[in-house]
Image (spheres, rainbow, N blue to C red):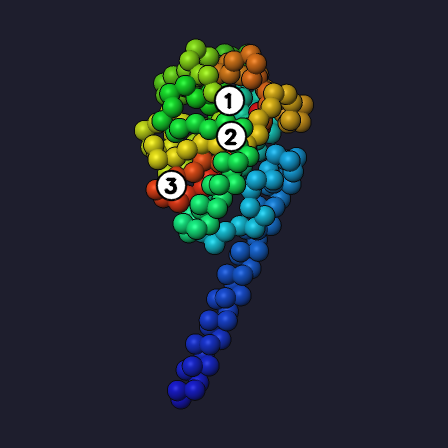
Amino acid sequence: MRKIILFIIGISLITISCQNHKIEKEFQNDFEKATSFIDSRIVNHFPKKLPYRYIFGTTLPRMDTLKYFGFGCDRIELSTTYTEKVYDSLKMHFNNIKVKEYSASDTSLLLIFSFCDTFEVDGYIFRDQETPEKQKLAKNNITIAKSLPIPLFYIEEYSGNTLCGLSKDFTIFVLGVEHGEYMNEKYLQECDCLPPNWKHGYSSGVAMSDIQKVIIYWTVIW
């Protein structure tokens, strides 16, 4: 009887393991598919394989929604926690190749985020549609911001009371950034929340927390 029970447990463990492996493979395929939509030079700082534990998100706005919801951006984010040894090694690497470094608590950051304060549907114009918080960020972008563009972060696990949305222990490394059209032309939208010299472009980089040993990889195109 004991052998039968152990055999059943063994079969169950194998089944669960196979299911986990299938799910992991599906997630890896989704990750690779998302990054394949973007020029490989812009996402080459991302890990090639998803880590053991991670938070992954992507937004790919398309014309049928943009015409109603206004300015959007193509965005990919992946965050994970590393061991101290791996984290320190990656930080040294990114520090060596960074274009610019900012503190998460910087109040003059230029932020990229979806925004539509006024839009028209069937001849009707709707104004003041954004939240006061987003309106304030848009004004900050036009009047105060001095940095290279970075994303506005929405990751709840690492959120904080800063302009960029992260907790104060994060440092932001911009690894690549350019003006210009890096999105399909038919998806490009003008935005009132960005200064003229950054109407379109891309930004990629990492946000790193020495305290939490967390790295947030990002690429955003608008």
Point out which mark residue 174 bears. 2
Q: Is residue 182 left or right of residue 161?
A: right
Q: Secondary structure at mark 3?
A: loop
Pick the residue in front: 56 or 127. 56
Q: For this rendering, which residue is in front, 92 or 61?
A: 92
Badge 2 density bin: few <14, some 14–19, many ≥20, Cα 10 Å: many
Left or right: 133 with respect to 39? left
- Lower position in the chain sequence, tag 3 or tag 1: 1
Foreground residue among 93 and 136: 93
Kindly identify the residue that appears in the image at 40 percent across and 28 percent down: 103
Say what amino acid the circle numbered 3 marks: Asp
User: Helix, strand or loop at disc 1?
Assistant: loop
What separation in Å lies between label 2 and label 3 (alpha carbons)? 17 Å
Q: Which residue is at a point 48% across and 66% down the rendered structure image? A: 16
Q: Amino acid at mark 2?
A: Val
Please name the residue that numbered disc 1 is placed on.
148
Image quarter of residue 68: top right
Q: Residue visible at 43% across and 38% down?
A: 208
Measuring from the top left, give residue 71's x and y in whole percent.
54, 21
Q: Residue at x 57, y 40 (%)?
A: 45
The quadrant holding residue 39 is top right
Residue annotated with mark 3 = 210
CB contact under 8 Å: marks 2 and 3: no
- The reply to whether callout 3 and callout 1 are in contact (CB within 8 Å) is no
